[in-house]
């Protein structure tokens, strides 16, 4: 039996390695240089180099030369990389509720003036997704045989 086809599996093959999403977090917070990313993530420098190269190769990160002698680069999120910030905000909200409920380590304020709370909703009706998704379709659907 082959495993279920799923976009989650595909996405995790790109960003599921340790440090990858923390790199995206730092870039989304405006940290652009290798030293700052290494400091804020705690990633070993050799592993961080590998992650940045992979994220660049798959189109999540782009690098820009900011010094020619010696060559030094800044890192930026591509549009695809910036979209991962929504995933991080949702993951952070889960962590705030289930791991750090008493004192979340980081809070954001929305431009509307209120504390930002990530929510996954239907783009059409605005209804919450968690309990209102039905009838999946597509090649990743596996139906259990009747016993």
Image (spheres, rainbow, N blue to C red):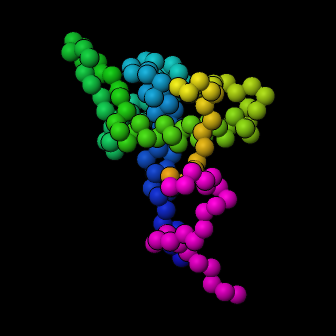
Which residue is at 70% across, 27% downward?
104
Q: Is residue 10 above or below residue 142?
A: above
Q: Quadrant of the C terminus?
A: bottom right
Q: Give x and y (percent) for residue 37.
A: 46, 23
Q: Give x and y (percent) for residue 13.
A: 45, 51
Judging depth in this view, the residue of 102 and 51 nearest the camera is 102
Residue 74 magenta: no
Which residue is at 63% across, 52% downward?
128
What secondary structure characterizes most of the magenta part? loop
Residue 47 in the figure: left or right of residue 130: left
Residue 146 seen in the current view: yes
Residue 138 magenta: yes
**Res 103 quadrant in image:** top right
Judging depth in this view, the residue of 108 and 126 nearest the camera is 126
Residue 3 seen in the current view: no
Residue that lies at the very extreme toward the right in this rendered image: 102
Residue that lies at the very extreme toward the top in this rendered image: 69
Q: Quadrant of the N terminus?
A: bottom right
Residue that lies at the very extreme toward the left in this rendered image: 68
Q: Is residue 110 above or below residue 36?
A: below
**Res 62 quadrant in image:** top left
Q: Is residue 117 above or below residue 1?
A: above
Q: Give x and y (percent) for residue 5.
A: 48, 66
Q: Give x and y (percent) for residue 88.
A: 54, 38
The magenta segment? 124-147
Which residue is at 21% across, 12% downward?
69
């Amino acid at each position: 039996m082959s495993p279920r086809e799923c976009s989650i599996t595909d996405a995790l093959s790109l960003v599921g390695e340790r440090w990858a999403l923390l790199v995206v977090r730092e870039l989304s917070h405006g940290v652009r240089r290798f030293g700052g990313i290494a400091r804020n993530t705690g990633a070993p420098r050799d592993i961080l180099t590998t992650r940045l190269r992979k994220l660049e190769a798959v189109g999540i990160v782009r690098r820009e030369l900011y010094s020619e002698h010696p060559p030094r680069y800044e890192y930026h999120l591509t549009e695809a990389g910036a979209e991962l910030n929504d995933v991080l905000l949702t993951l952070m909200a889960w962590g705030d509720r289930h791991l750090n409920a008493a004192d979340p380590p980081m809070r954001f304020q929305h431009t509307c003036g209120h504390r930002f709370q990530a929510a996954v909703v239907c783009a059409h009706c605005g209804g919450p997704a968690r309990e209102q998704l039905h009838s999946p379709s597509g090649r990743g659907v596996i139906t259990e045989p009747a016993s």
